[in-house]
Image (cartoon, rainbow, N blue to C red):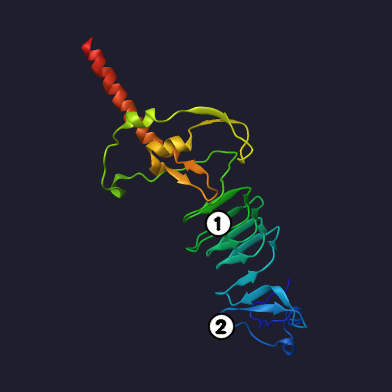
Amino acid sequence: MANFTGQNICNTFNSILNIGSSGDIQCCLPASGQIIITDSIGNDSALCLGRQTNGITVTGNICTTNNIQATGTITSSNTIQGSTICSTGAINSTGDLSVNGGCVTVTGTGNTCVKGTLNVDSTLTVQGTATVTGEIRSCADVVAYYTSDCNLKSNLNKICNTQSIINGLSGYSFDWNDKSDKEGSDLGLMAQDVQKVLPSIVKERDNGYLAVDYIKLIPVLIEEVKRLSAEVEELKSIK
């Protein structure tokens, strides 16, 4: 592979392949933005080159069995695939992002966007916010801590009417039907039931179906158990 360090890279394949020959150098990289690499007769390629701060853009696949590393943004209009993918900027792919045996590390402040499938065989490290519009499925544990520090909260009020909330819900065993992308038997609530008593924890997804934030049922259950426990203790004292 040619080493372009310190060379005047011009915008034709012919001159890049013959880098170092001053007669082939037609132009330098622009101070801002990028240039499209063309062949010797002026046909555009899938590669755009810029200076270090502007990086490269590929309108096809970025595939390698080695590492992909950038101090800026990694952008592709198709698949990005490598053994390790590291960026201090953003990683943007309208195709799949696949990592074979390595890790994905993004330390920049930009957003990382994958519109295809994210496949990581080893470690995915995100130091910012990860937003997923599809499902997250794992064959191993999913470990997370939900922000709950009292210093971050105001307007605290004890949950009331827990008895009526719980009485308005029913637990079911059921089988997923062919309208869902799930299979087999399962246990759960009906989102429509939850919506009637706790509408704030029900969300309508883009596909029109309702989803329940089950985690937010925990404080309701805790307060209801405390209520029942106090009722039991009161009955014991009567005896």
Question: Residue drawn at (51%, 28%), measured in percent from left and top?
Answer: 172
| Residue 14 versus residue 66 in the image, above or below | below
Q: What quarter of the picture does the N terminus occupy?
A: bottom right
Type of the residue with mark 2: Ala
The tag earlier along the polypeptide, 2 or 1, is: 2
Residue 121: x and y in percent read: 63, 48
| Residue 8 versus residue 129 in the image, above or below | below
Front in this rendered view, residue 32 or 51: 32
Q: Residue furthest bottom?
A: 23
Question: Residue drawn at (56%, 83%), measured in percent from left and top?
Answer: 31
Number of marks in picture: 2
Quarter of the rendering containing residue 116: bottom right
Left or right of 97: which side holds 187? left
Type of the residue with mark 1: Thr
Residue 10: x and y in percent read: 68, 83
| Residue 2 versus residue 21 in the image, above or below | above
> Pointer 2: what residue?
31
Residue 80: x and y in percent read: 65, 60
Question: Residue drawn at (31%, 49%), measured in percent from left and top?
Answer: 152
Left or right of 30: which side holds 191? left
Q: Residue furthest top?
A: 239
**Circle 1 crowding by C-alpha within 10 Å: few under 14, some 14–19, many from 20:** some
Front in this rendered view, residue 179 or 122: 179
Distance, label 2 to label 1, CA atoms, is: 28 Å
**Circle 2 crowding by C-alpha within 10 Å: few under 14, some 14–19, many from 20:** few
> Pointer 1: what residue?
105
Front in this rendered view, residue 15 or 209: 209
**Helix, strand or loop under label 1:** strand
